Amino acid sequence: MSRPDCRFGSHRVIAPAGALPQAAERLDPSLPARENEILIAVDTLNIDSASFAQIAGEVGHDGPAIAERVRSIVASRGKMQNPVTGSGGMLLGTVTSRGPAYDTHPDAIPGARVATLVSLTLTPLQLDEIRSVRVEADQVEVRGHAMLPPSAPLVVVPSDLDERTSLSALDVCGAPAQVARLAKPGMRVVVLGAGKSGLLCMAQARDTMGSTGRIVGVDLRSPSLEGAKAAGLIDAWATCDARDPLAAYAAITGALGGEADLVVNAANVADTEMASILAARDGGTVYFFNMATSFSRAALGAEGVGKDATLIIGNGFAPGHAALTLDLVRRHPFVRQTFERLGG
């Protein structure tokens, strides 16, 4: 007997009993859709940066090998949840149907192009075909279907931006929304990682702070940082390997002129917790949007070096986060050009 429809999608959980979809080991993505679900014909998966980097590091930057790894994960779990990073991404597709008890997102009608604003780690997903892998964009072109319950946010894709550009930006829209809350005029801010989420965080910090304070971008390589500096998003930049905390601390504090009030970790690799924590002043804040972050490494590491900083684990949802992010893309030419290059 099927379980009653649940607003949070627990009726799709196969195991373990009582789990919510994100924590579940396996979901049931089979048709038909339930009365409280919206059904989406999926054509693009945007794999989150940490997960894609891990997969590429494991199997190589080879499209067919990455495709096979994604296929096997989805086939075994009924969702795209990397077993190493625990993260997923989000998707782009077309609404096929909405059940009579689906009571959210009134504009998401059959035929609408939508992007999910909820992780693939809790999205029931079935893939019938993987058509191609866009390694440079962390995207996988597919044919399949997914369904979402009423609690899961999504957005109708805007018509003034390329769909894949929107998808790339919306995948990380929680990051700049949280920076809008945390950054204050006059602060010294460090953004660790100059990828998609990092650039959006830089743009939001600049919007919030204006010409006050100081913003430093940090990455392993310089091209994106140089572009961000030329565009006025940051005041200075530093290159370093954030997995080497002492070397990173020296590079960051040298570029910033001291320790930071706010450190945003938007990197996509593990073992960057201590570089972020060391760079923050006592009483400062470290915001981890990196999905490879270890809570235990961060908490125990801060304790071990006697750093009195507030540690915040990134929340991918905030009211208005999609609109805020798309507005950043529209208003900052360098950000838009970067996302068009990655997503287009």
Image: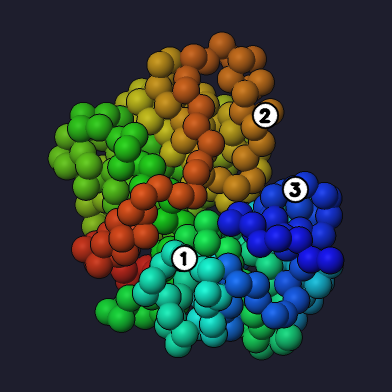
Question: Which residue is depicted at the point 44% across and 39% down?
Answer: 264
Residue of label 3: 19
Determine the residue located farthest toward the top in the rendered image: 306
Between residue 79 and residue 86, name the one nearer to us: 79
Image depth: mark 2 or mark 1 in front? 1
Residue of label 1: 103
Between residue 122 and residue 214, name the one nearer to us: 122
Please report whichever mark, 1 or 3, sits nearer to the chain's N-terminal start.
3
Image depth: mark 2 or mark 3 in front? 3
Residue 211 in the image: x percent, y percent? Answer: 15, 40
Determine crowd level at label 1: few under 14, some 14-19, many 20+ residues with C-alpha closer than 10 A: some
Determine crowd level at label 3: few under 14, some 14-19, many 20+ residues with C-alpha closer than 10 A: some
Alpha carbon distance from label 2 to label 3: 26 Å
Question: Which residue is depicted at the point 61% across and 28% down?
Answer: 298
Residue 288 in the image: x percent, y percent? Answer: 52, 38
Residue 266 in the image: x percent, y percent? Answer: 49, 46
Question: Which residue is depicted at the point 61% across and 54% down?
Answer: 8
Q: Is residue 67 in view from this perspective?
A: no
Element assignment for label 1: loop
Quarter of the N terminus within the rendering: bottom right
Residue 297's disc is: 2
Element assignment for label 2: helix
Give the vertical position of 173 relative to 90 (above or below): above
Tell me the amino acid under the disc marked 1. Answer: Asp
